[in-house]
Image (spheres, helix red, strand yellow):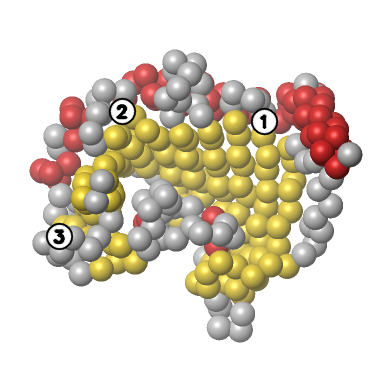
Amino acid sequence: MKTIKNDYSMNNELEELDIFLKSDENIRDIKPFEKMNSKYIDLQKAYTNMFYQIYKNVELQTKRKEFSKGGLGFHRGVYSPSSLDLVVNNLSRGRIINNDKSSSDFNYEYLFDSEDNLICVNTYMEINGTKKHAITEIILNENDIELGLTYDANNDNLISISECYYANGILIRYEYVICNMFYGGEGCEEINVEAPTFKNNLLESVAWSNYLPKMHLLCQYVYSFIRDDKGYIYKYTHKQISGYKSKSNVSNETSIYETQKRRK
């Protein structure tokens, strides 16, 4: 009887989701993300198989390097534009280590130009017991927009694209898109957008949107941060502001949670 009840509950939830996806609310809310999807499809077409042509200037522009350990699975590790490591379990930036590539104890290699702009990130992973260069992200800076193009170092495939928008040197919007590697280039796998807000130049909140174009499914959340008397973020509140939410989800939106890390 328990199995039948669980199956029935799952069927109900699938029906709820289907109704929501066809709703006027969802169709309205996903319109800007569908435009974003089209933008990134165009970027994928423009930069697919362009790795070697773009990379040729990276080494010429490089003036210094840094290395870090850990942070694998988090875009750019230490230098990730994302703030979600504060609230998501098992997300780590890693840490900067001795700038010596002769040591094998690193996962990221960061390249900077003469103006100290980050222009390239090389990711190293353990593959069959051997540390290998697995991924390269080339970062193109133009005015207040930073375009990141991440390629598989072994086969030149475009894995992901990011765009960061700055105002007076402060990040105001971060888009991170997993490229469509399985559906013939007809859309992106996943689109994530973070829009931070600041108070007195300190992070106050982050609005996070997660969109799955193939399903037309959008969920949006706001994380508001609380600081201790020394100015460190140590708690946050979480609220879902739009998108599908199961009727079985009874989470208390006013709850306060401990952050995964403490930082200013």
Taking the spot 73% from the left edge, 67% from the top edge, the residue there is 256
Q: Nearer the viewer, residue 208 or 12?
A: 12
Q: Which residue is mark 3?
A: 101
Give residue 157's mark.
Answer: 2
In the rendered view, does 124 fall on the left or right side of 40?
Answer: left
Q: Amino acid at mark 1?
A: Leu
Residue 254's place in the image compared with 159, above or below, is below
Q: Residues within 10 Å of mark 2 (few under 14, many from 20)?
A: some
Q: Residue 141's x, y, as percent?
A: 31, 42
Q: Amino acid at mark 3?
A: Lys
Taking the spot 39% from the left edge, 24% from the top edge, the residue there is 44
Q: Residue 131's x, y, as percent?
A: 22, 51
**What is the secondary structure assignment of the residue under circle 1?**
strand
Q: Which residue is mark 1?
A: 217
Give residue 131's mark.
Answer: none
Whichever of callouts 3 and 2 sits on the residue coming sooner in the sequence is 3
**What is the secondary structure assignment of the residue under circle 3?**
loop
